[in-house]
Image: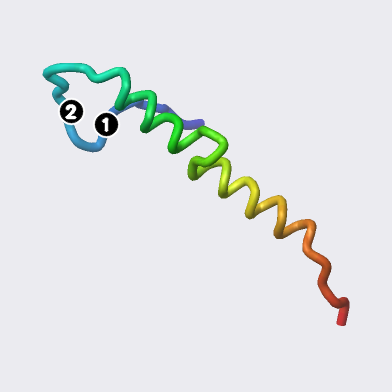
């Protein structure tokens, strides 16, 4: 088995939280126009592409 430690690679100190910026960053990763959405579209399009058997 394995042990999962939720630990950051570099220590982060936040002096003043900014909820607007946090929401923007999260939307870039997981929103419809974000990186995760784009990668899932590319993956699904790859498996739907017609190709010549040969």
For residue 23, the mark is none
Q: Identify whether 9 is placed above or below 6.
A: below
Q: How many marks?
A: 2
Where in the figure is residue 47, as x and y percent of width and height?
A: 76, 57
Mark 1 residue crowding within 10 angstroms, few (<14) / some (14–19) / many (20+): few
Query: Residues under labels 2 and 1: Cα distance?
Result: 8 Å
Mark 2 residue crowding within 10 angstroms, few (<14) / some (14–19) / many (20+): few
Residue occupying the point 52% across, 33% down = 31
Residue occupying the point 25% across, 37% down = 9
Front residue of this view, candidates 1 and 46: 46
Q: Do the residues labelled 2 and 1 touch (CB within 8 Å)?
A: yes
Colouring rule applied to residues = rainbow
Look at mark 2 in the image and give the residue it sits on: 12
Residue occupying the point 38% across, 30% down = 24
Say which element carries label 1. loop
Where in the figure is residue 39, as x and y percent of width and height?
A: 57, 49
Look at mark 1 in the image and give the residue it sits on: 8
Q: Identify whether 24 is placed above or below 53.
A: above
Front residue of this view, candidates 35 and 2: 35
Quadrant into which the C terminus falls = bottom right
Front residue of this view, candidates 6 and 28: 28
């Amino acid at each position: 088995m394995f042990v999962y430690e939720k630990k950051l690679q570099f220590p982060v100190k936040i002096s003043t939280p900014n909820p607007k910026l946090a929401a923007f960053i999260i939307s870039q990763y997981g929103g419809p126009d974000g990186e995760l959405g784009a990668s899932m579209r590319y993956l699904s399009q790859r498996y739907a592409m017609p190709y010549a058997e040969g």
